[in-house]
Image (cartoon, helix red, strand yellow):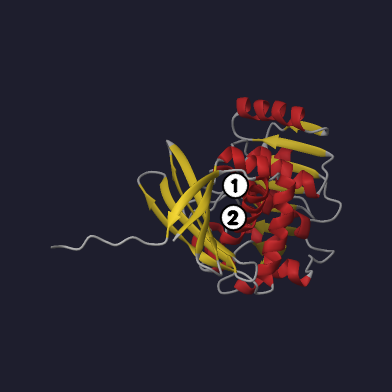
Amino acid sequence: MLSSAIWLSEENITALVSLKEAIGVLETGVRALGTGEGFNIPKALGAYGDASSMHSLGSALPEAGFCGYKNWINTPRGAKAVYVLFDAHEGRLLAIMEANALGQMRTSAMTGLGTKWVARPGADDMAIIGTGRQALAQVAAVHAVRPLARIRVWSPTAENRQAFFETLRAQFDTEVVVADSLVQACDGATIVTTVTRAREPFLDAGVLGRGVHLNAVGAILPHSAEFSQDVFARVGFIAVDDVAGAQKASREFIDYFEKGPGKGDWSRVRPLGEVIAGGETPAPDCDISLFKAMGMGISDLSVAVLAYQRAKDAQIGQSISLMANAPIRLPV
C-alpha cells in the first residue's frame, strides 16, 4: 500500500513558522505536558572525541495525534539535526524535516516562555551574556514576551561584543549598550540570559541584583556550567523545562541537588508545564528567579506539528512516496 510523507527544508520551516508563533504553540504543548496530556522520552546522549556528541529526543501528544523524534549530531566542524514526525493514532510517517532552524526556534521560544511565566511582570532591562549563534534569537524571544527598554551585551571578546551590538541595534528599536565587564552588564539588569559554551562557571551570585530573573541556557551537557553554586542560595523560585533532563545532564543542578547543599531536595525544581498548568508564580519577595532549559521533546514536537500542518495547507514541501512493507531476501 502506497502512502506519502513530506520533506521540509530549513527554508520551508522558517517560512512556515515565526518565532512569536513558536512561543504560542510551545505554551500549548508545555501546558499539555503539565496536565498529563503529553509526555517526553528521556534524551539519549552519546559524547565522543574532544567536543562531539549525538542526541535523540522524543515526545508525544497522543490526544492531538502526533509524536516524533529529533536526532542530531554536534561536532567542532559542524552540526545537523532532523525531525521525524509520526501520526500517533495510525502509525504513519508524516514528515521528515531539517531541524537546525527548528531547534534554534524552539530553544529561544522556550526561554521566552520561561521568562513570560517566571520573570517579574515589569522586567524590561536585559543582559545577554554570550554573542554566539543562539544569542540573537534569545534576545528576540525575551523581547516578544517582555518588551525591552534596554539590552546590555557582554562576551569575553571585545570584537564579538561590538559586532553583536551592531546587529542588535539594527534589529531592535530599543537602547542597546555594550558592557565592558560581566559586572557592568548585570548591574541593574532585571533579566539575565546566559547562552555560552562555558566549561566552568563564571556567573556568581554577587553580580546579580535582587529581583533579577536568570535564564541559564548554554550549559546542557554534564561537562559544562555557567553559574556558580552560590546562586542557588539566593534563588526563591526554580523552573526547568524538563526535570529529568536537568537531573541527567545539568552539571549546575547535579552539583547542588545531588552532591551539594540541596542534596535530595529536587522538589524545589518545578517543571514549567506544571507551573503553566497551575498558574504558579514566584513570591513577591523572591530574590532571584531561575529558569533552566535543557531541551525536551515536546518543544520540538510543538513547533514541528505547526510547520507540518501549515505545509499541508499550503502544499509546501517535497512529497516522499512510501511503501507499507517489502519482503526481505532470505538466505538460500
The C terminus sits in image quarter = bottom left
Figure check: 2 above or below 172: below
At x 57% / y 66%, what residue is drawn? 60
At x 60% / y 73%, what residue is drawn? 265
Residue 319, image x and y in percent? Answer: 52, 46
Crowding at label 1, few (<14), some or many (≥20) Cα neighbours within 10 Å?
Answer: many
Give whichever of discs 2 and 1 has the lower sequence position.
1
| Quarter of the rendering containing residue 314 | top right
Circles 2 and 1, Cβ within 8 Å, touching? The answer is yes
Crowding at label 2, few (<14), some or many (≥20) Cα neighbours within 10 Å?
Answer: many
At x 63% / y 45%, what residue is drawn? 315
The type of residue carrying mark 1 is: Leu
Residue 187, image x and y in percent? Answer: 76, 42
Q: Residue furthest right?
A: 122
Which of 186/83 is in front? 83
Q: Which residue is the site of mark 1?
A: 102
